[in-house]
Amino acid sequence: MIRILIADDQSLVRAGFRVLLEKSPDLRVVGEAGDGAEAVALTAELRPDVALMDIRMPGTDGVEATRRICADPLTARTRVLILTTFDLDEYVYAAIQAGASGFLLKDTLAPDLLSAVRTVARGDAVTAPSVTRRLLERHVQTATAPPADDGLSRLTEREREVLVLIARGLSNAEIAEIAERLYLTDGTVKTHVSRVLAKLGLRDRVQAVVRAYESGLVRVGG
């Protein structure tokens, strides 16, 4: 059973998502929050697997709520899925930086929403790396500089190559298609991706793309 928290300042929106989600026997809504501060408090209390987080809320918005949830060891296991009205909302980049596992438009079709919740609950990201790349190319030039120790020195040469390919928006299958050049099998690609995430302390591929751009390993327009 996947346990879900819905955070949105509009009660009708929350009710609509609840009805939709609870039609599936493997999904259960365990709480609703009307703002970011309440979402943080309920996440700590209820420990949901996934938090559907509206990005624009009064008071503590979805970005700050995401940052608090992902930074707290007690709630960091909760995956945050951002809900936004507009594609490439200016706040989405900040939310991904804060630890969100991806974002969806509020008018996403029901089957896609259900699939996204299940995907995020498994620990994967639902935002395509190519979409994240567009976000980064739009915002990375004004982003806060990464810490001096960006972790890349811990990667092997092969792992750095795989990280670059991830940052360019390639899936594991697409990386495998060019594996002959890298002398990699499909299984080895998956192993390298897992090691990159582990060594850099990243939650998913979305954060890997962010780290690659912010560290300068991959450059805008490069």
Image (cartoon, rainbow, N blue to C red):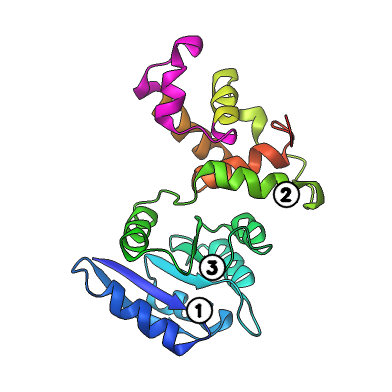
In this picture, residue 60 sits left or right of residue 121: right
Q: Which residues are magenta?
A: 166-188
Tell whether label 1 touches label 3 (CB within 8 Å): yes
Q: Is residue 204 above or below residue 99?
A: above
Q: Residue at x 53, y 42 (%)?
A: 129
Number of the front mark, 1 or 2: 2
Q: Is residue 82 magenta?
A: no
Say the numbered circle drawn on residue 39.
Answer: 1
Depth check, mark 3 against mark 1: the one in front is: 1
Counting residues from the start of the chain, the first of labels 3 and 2 encountered is: 3
Identity, as a three-letter code, of the amino acid under mark 3: Ile
Residue that carries the numbered disc 3 in the rendered image: 69
Residue 75 horizontal side relative to residue 136, left or right = left
Label drawn at residue 11: none
Q: CA distance from mark 1 to mark 2?
A: 29 Å
For residue 173, what is the image quadrant?
A: top left
- The residue indicated by pointer 2 is 138
- Under circle 2, the secondary element is helix
Q: Position of residue 202 (x, y in %)?
A: 54, 45
Residue at image position (50%, 71%) is: 53
Gap in Å between the C-alphas at discs 3 and 1? 9 Å
Q: Amino acid at mark 2?
A: Arg
Residue 175: say if magenta: yes
Q: Earlier in the sequence, mark 1 or mark 2?
A: 1
